[in-house]
Amino acid sequence: MHALPPLPATPPLLWDIFCRVIDNFGDIGVCWRLSADLAARGHQVRLWVDDASPLQWMAPGALEGRWPGVQVREWGQSQDARALAALAPADVWIEGFGCEIATEFIAAYAESTDHSGQNIVQFPVWINLEYLSAERYVELAHGLPSPVMSGPAKGWTKHFYYPGFSAHTGGLLREPDLLQRQQAFAQEGQRAAWLARNGVAWEGEQLVSLFCYEPPALRALLEQLDAQATPTRLLVTPGRAQQAVQAARTGLQRLRIDYLPHLTQHDFDHLLWACDLNCVRGEDSVVRGLWAGKPLVWQIYPQQDAAHHAKLDAFLDMLGADATLRAFHYAWNGVTGTSGDAPPLPLIHLNTWSETLQAARQRLLQMDDLGTQLIAFVQKKR
């Protein structure tokens, strides 16, 4: 389907990656991207997922088995002893975002291992792939072992694996051919052609992408874009972002709005590369926004105890965000001040924000990507 880079110098491995879909696109988006990245490096991956429906548009052909190196399997099959008996044991298990592998799956593997020393099968490297954060604890917890104290895998060891933004973390997902694809898209005419293929009648306006939940300051953003002297076109992704815009757009005069179809993961990259400002949400899209190198605003996944506020501050510190970019994020995410009131939405400062994002991107490109680091981690543990 895509040109593959040279095979890895280390022997290819068989990976079982487990994913339970909680936030409809984020969990499966990260787990699929990792699966496809490993497969492109010559490995074999079985992706066990409880809701694979987003892959129909995110990675066309995946469910039909047309993606080289990746098999998509229903979560229920991981609890079917008869089906499991026919599977080759994997070298690596990855629990995406702390989802727990089915006890039946673990038992099937443990029971196939002869603990007397005869025909012993090497235990898999078992990894808990954690959520992305720039907070300090990530560096401290990355790679730590976690002994399994009960169940059929008693005595085995899991390891915490934290993606992150520093050399003391597991890095960020970045395919080996990403920069090459990005450079090709930057060639003259590619942006206009891509927009036209996706139904956007672009006439040179400033472009803003919107992938969000229901940000408190959405109406304020629409009004600001509508009032700008520079004509603006808002490109809205399907689902919650589209519904939120449709509920808040009343009375706008000049702002042009396009509602996009569902995009493949590659085309989501194209959207971010095409725009002058990207409003992204969740984990996968903020990483893609960083690689795009364009000004971005991140709507972090909200938590009831407001734990996401500290996570947002750590991210802004990592970026080196100035006062305007920080204030915009606070308003966009509904971070209230000491008075308890939501702050007003500041004006957009594309030039200074662009410099900030470009500098952050260059720093992050100096790190080994998550796939490279993960493979090395697994080889070391084996």
Image (cartoon, grey):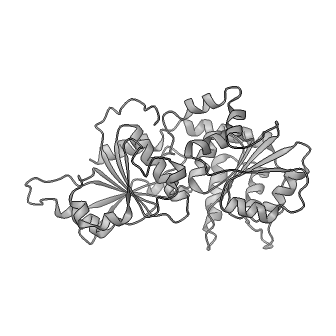
How many discs mark residues in the rendered view? 0
The part of the image, by quadrant, that contains residue 144 is bottom left
Q: Is residue 286 above or below residue 366?
A: below
Q: Residue furthest top?
A: 188
In the foreground, 56 or 91 = 56
Image quarter where the N terminus lies is top left
In the foreground, 213 or 346 = 213
| Residue 320 place in picture, x, y as percent | 68, 46
In the foreground, 63 or 42 = 63
Residue at x-position 41% and y-position 38%:
40
Relative side of 153 to 219, left or right: left
| Residue 378 place in picture, x, y as percent | 33, 47
Is residue 153 among what the camera can see?
Answer: no
Relative side of 238 to 134, left or right: right
Residue at x-position 79% and y-position 68%:
342
Residue at x-position 46% and y-position 61%:
97
| Residue 111 place in picture, x, y as percent | 17, 64
Residue at x-position 52% and y-position 56%:
54
In the foreground, 118 or 41 = 41
Is residue 216 among what the camera can see?
Answer: yes
Q: Is residue 206 above or below residue 138?
A: above
| Residue 268 place in picture, x, y as percent | 61, 45
The part of the image, by quadrant, that contains residue 86 is bottom left
Relative side of 40 to 123, left or right: right
